[in-house]
Image (cartoon, rainbow, N blue to C red):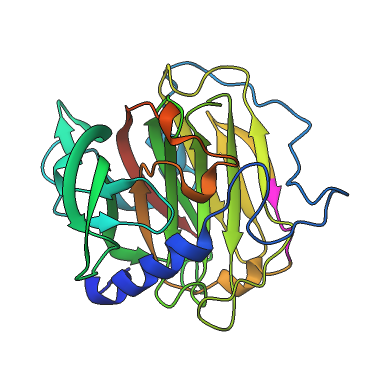
Amino acid sequence: MKTSTVAALFLTWLCFAGLGSCKKPTALKPDTTTTNNKPPTNPKTAVTTCDYDFSETDFTNSGWTKIFDDEFTGDLSNWYAFTGGVQNEQQCFEPANVQIVNGVLQISAKQETVTGPATINSTTQKTFNYTSGSIVSNLTFSASSSAPKMRIVARIKVASGYGLVSLFDSYGINWPTNGQINFLQVEGNDTKEYETNYFFGNTPGQNIVNNSILFNPADQDLSTCWHVFMTEWTKTSLNYYLDGQLVEQKTAGGEVPSLFGKEENLALSLPIGGLYYEDFVPANIQTGTMYVDYIKVFTSN
């Protein structure tokens, strides 16, 4: 793990926000796995368990070492909170919208009028009708030759409501040259499925990965109970688990090996609208909250 500089992440965020997101159902980069260029849906519906939790002991007994653990019982010293807007989105990110309440991280989208930076780190001011929250970890993480397997685990209740997007991902500086992994993305108007994806490119601002998006249906609403989302990052694949069950093994796009050894910061956010929605109707926005019980990271050989 390494400590990143916040200044570098500002530039990364601007690239990420404008280029690294995708809207549903059409990907920002053309997806050729279907004839209509729409991302595919996993034919298997994930079987979930309401208020699921996992056993750390089972992990450690099988050779995994915990290297990061935030159960949100203290403060937010492990994270940096952004301030400002994102191009094409409705919210101004405000640190006050990210709070720890009774051992749970709450990222809330609110309807309120504020004036803030038009985009993160911008000197231009803009008036917004909504606020929300976005944080990024001060530490970076990577599956690498010294720790070739990494598991990123989060226990989350996603936000419900039109216009909201619960997002947990990781990304490095100079997007996407150090990669980006979407662990989960859930649109608030369809909380019975979540999207996974990843990005990479050799030139800043230019993603070269195609055919990597997958929408994973679940058998119940992901906003009504706690669910554990785990991504296992290895040199050759990204393996996604929901409530202890393997949902998908991602190798599509051909660039997963390019992520190996790339340092990435973890990020949690609740954007509103933007590229995540097709034919977005601002008048229909609903406010809501994304809840996070913990974030843990494990490594293994």
Q: Is residue 125 above or below residue 176?
A: above
Is residue 54 visible to us here?
no
Q: Position of residue 259 (x, y in %)?
A: 56, 70
Q: Is residue 241 above or below residue 160?
A: below
Near-viewer residue (188 or 169):
188
Numbered range of the magenta stretch: 249-253
> As rendered, which of 284 and 241 lies closer to the eye?
284
Q: Residue at x 67, y 42 (%)?
A: 25
Q: Residue furthest left?
A: 74
Does residue 169 appear to the left or right of 71 in the view shown?
A: right
Q: Quadrant of residue 166?
A: top left
Residue displayed at 11% across by 44% down: 75
Along the horizontal axis of the image, is 228 left or right of 120?
A: right
Q: Is residue 250 magenta?
A: yes
Secondary structure mainly formed by the magenta segment: loop
> On the rendered image, what quadrant is the N terminus found in?
bottom left
Residue 231: where, in percent of width, then height?
Answer: 53, 47
Name the residue furthest right: 35
Residue at (42%, 46%) from the top-left corner? Answer: 168
Q: Name the foreground residue: 66 vs 246.
A: 246
Along the line of sight, the residue nearer the viewer: 24 or 130: 130
Give the quadrant of residue 48: top right
Q: Residue at x 38, y 44 (%)?
A: 271
Q: Please check the rendered image and state whether residue 207 is part of the magenta-colored stretch, yes or no.
A: no
Regarding residue 147, the answer to whether it shows in the image is yes
Above or below, 171 against 228 in this view is: below
